[in-house]
Image (spheres, rainbow, N blue to C red):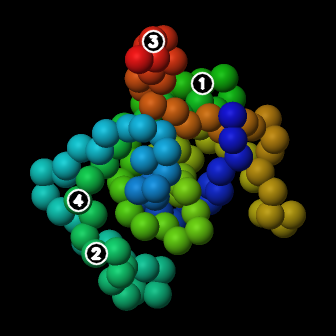
Amino acid sequence: MADKRILVDSGVMDNFIHPKFVKRLHVGMQELERPMKIWNIDGTTNQAGRLTHFVDLLVQTKGQEKKMHFLVTDLGVEDVILGYPWLSTFEPQFSWKDATVDTNILPVVIRSPDWYTLMLKPSI
């Protein structure tokens, strides 16, 4: 298990993942039906260009597991951004005054749906 940089952003309407992290997970990306334009928080277009791919990953929080959709784009230093889909599914509790999340939701585990299959494959 490894620690990764994950940002929780209540203003983001999707979940996002960095392409380098997708590669480390050994997950195949799928092409979106139509590319999507993405904007930065300041209203400028993202320099990574349009979103063209996604991955579906299993996310485990508070003992619950759910398959979730992640759009692939360069996130700078972050590996993952958990947005509204994660927030509405797992409903974590935050202390806005202390800028902390209730530790009962930890750890957040993100893995490939094929993880068990990959672990059982014999080495050649």
Point out the tag, 1 or 2, that comes first from the N-terminus.
Answer: 2
Residue 114 rendering spot, x and y as whole percentages: 41, 23
Q: Earlier in the sequence, mark 1 or mark 3?
A: 1
Give me the residue at 49% from left, 67% from top.
75
Give the spatial CA distance, label 2 vs label 4: 9 Å
Give the spatial CA distance, label 3 vs label 2: 39 Å
> Which amino acid lies under the numbered mark 3 shown in the image of this protein?
Pro
- In the orientation shown, which residue stands out farthest toward the front? 124
Instruction: Tell me the kind of residue under disc 1.
Output: Gln
Residue 24 placement (x, y as % from top left): 49, 45
Q: CA gap, disc 1 to disc 3?
A: 29 Å
- The residue positioned 29% from the left and 44% from the top of the image is 29
Residue that extends furthest to the left in the rendered view of this protein: 33
Identify the residue position indicated by label 2 in the image.
49
Of tags 1 and 3, which is closer to the observer? Answer: 3
Q: Is residue 57 above or below residue 93?
A: above
* Residue under label 3: 122
- Please indicate, yes or no, whether residue 11 appears anywhere in the rendered image: yes
Closer to the observer: label 1 or label 4? 4
Q: CA distance from mark 1 to mark 2?
A: 34 Å
**Between marks 1 and 2 in the image, the one whose residue lies nearer the viewer:** 2
Instruction: Please give the residue where the numbered disc 1 appears in the rendered image.
Output: 64
The amino acid beneath tag 4 is Thr
Q: For the residues marked 1 and 4, what is the alpha-carbon distance in whole angstroms? A: 29 Å
Q: Are marks 1 and 4 in contact (CB under 8 Å)?
A: no
| Residue carrying label 4 | 52
Using a 10 Å C-alpha cutoff, classify the residue at mark 2 as few (fewer than 14 neighbours), some (14 to 19) or many (20 or more): some
Asked which quadrant contains residue 104, the reply is top right
Please say if the residues under marks 2 and 4 sit with CB atoms less than 8 Å apart.
no
